[in-house]
Image (cartoon, rainbow, N blue to C red):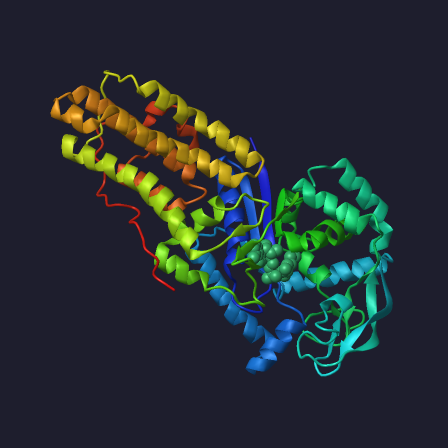
Amino acid sequence: MEKKKYYITTPIYYPSANFHIGHCYTTVIADSIARYKKLKGYDVYFLTGSDEHGLKIQKKAEEKGVTPKEYVDEVIKNAKDLWNSLGIEYNRFIRTTDEDHVATVQKIFQKLYDQGDIYKGSYEGLYCTPCESFWTESQLVDGKCPDCGREVEKASEEAYFFKLSKYQDRLVDYIETHPEFIQPISRKNEMMNNFIKPGLEDLCVSRTSFTWGIPVTFDNKHIVYVWIDALSNYISALGYLSNDDSLFKKFWPADLQIVGKEIVRFHTIIWPCLLMALDLPLPKQIFGHGWLVINGAKVSKSLGNYRDPREYIKEYGVDAIRYYLLREVPFGSDGQFSEELLISRYNTDLANIVGNLVNRTLSMLSKYFDGIITKSYVQTEYDEDLINLVLSTSQKVDDYMDKLEISEALDCIFEIFRRCNKYIDETTPWVLAKEENKDKLKTVLYNLLASIRIGAILLLPYIPTTANEILRQINTKKITIDTINDFYTLETNIIINDFKPIFMRVEKKHE
Ligand code: ME8
């Protein structure tokens, strides 16, 4: 039987500066969902990338005395290094400077022009002559240019426009008949009431005032401006309008497109209208998540209020960061990021609950049975409750993941480890050892390891390094999802591998 397919995307981020913890947030979440789907047997395509054109990048490069391409190449090298150290398993990292993307964007622009959805007009805006930039009223700071603080003046330039207004009724109809399209639901209401229903204006899709962009083939003093270039990445990456569009045929429409709440608007208005104009199906869901904030302010490039995420990974380990991003903030809401909270999550959940449990259990097995896993027929009165909880977890995780309640799914898996710690308190293995009650002791240690094995498999999508290390220490070969419905799958007469605590409690290392 052909595997079910799943296509998931993150936004493509601006490489005007190195990626920060906010970019890590979206990407780690998408990666965990992709890994979860793979674990469940789906054929997954996971796309992320970078949005490399535009005046801001052109200016940054000029300031540094390099070409825009040289400038972004450096940032992208760091970004790929960051994704690598965060364990991001993407299928493709698309760059809008990639040749195939450029070619597809040019074909899309041409097609829309040929069919009358793009037309020539003039763009009116507030222009800062020294910066050669157009601004909107709301972008100005104290009525002046937000970049240099100088006066701006009304100006107009020739530009191409996309007929967004033509698709308004179809868009309203689609959103109303597809309640799952924009999630969470609050964002759907906001889009409908604040932006769509008041009326859509045609969108300016080209510029002549700067050059760092994709040239319009039929009028090459124009470059494609922002959204047609950026949004098309989700289909150009799969080979849309190219010689080989097999990936496109297989994976489009996307199952899930994750974006931060500030760009929901572009993804739920411009993007669907563009797809309608291209006569393509719409993605099944756009999910707009909340922001990570530090001391009340959004983590952002322009504020620069953050440290390089690679430093956190070096100090606390990759899974401390992944776990924090996945667990701390309910998906959809805003949430705090701070080193104190990161350390506290690390110590209470990772070190105390999981780390301690695995280490205590393996130490006891090593001490009492030379590290050999065995089983006996003697039972304890606490087994049934433990086993029931462990075996019921996978379904609960699936239910949460279906609703993208990732923090809740993780908490539910941790319930296994918390229950195991309670089981140790209930059965007191050290007392069983003293009483030479070896059969009962075997049962207790087997049940603990069997539960830890299942918990570790369930953890694979979220904190894969830790989950794999636990499975390695136990030395089990039963590590696939189809082995977790039978509690007794854990092998006997195997010797556990060398082990050491997976997490050591940490103190803050940085002011
Ligand atoms: O908007 N909290 O790029 P960008 C959570 N190139 N997520 C955050 C965040 C924060 N504080 N800060 C950033 C762009 N993000 C465009 C997108 S898509 C076709 C084009 C994440 O570099 C979040 O996913 O400004 C947000 O939407 C994205 O980074 C913005 O990245």
In the image, 312 versus 27, the foreground residue is 312
Q: Is residue 282 visible?
A: no
Instruction: Describe residue 400's horizontal placement relative to residue 311 as left or right.
Output: right
Give the answer, above or below, for where 438 lies relative to 157: above
Q: Quadrant of the N terminus?
A: top right
Q: Quadrant of the C terminus?
A: bottom left
Image location of residue 249, percent across then percent down = 66, 45
Name the residue located 50 percent from the left edge and 41 percent from the top edge: 407
Name the residue located 34 percent from the left edge and 61 percent from the top edge: 509
Give the answer, above or below, for where 17 lies relative to 380: below
Name the residue located 83 percent from the left edge and 76 percent from the top edge: 154
Image location of residue 13, percent across then percent down = 59, 60
Name the residue located 73 percent from the left edge and 63 percent from the top edge: 106
Give the answer, above or below, for where 245 lies relative to 511: above
In the image, 328 versus 24, the foreground residue is 328
- The image quarter in which residue 58 lies: bottom right
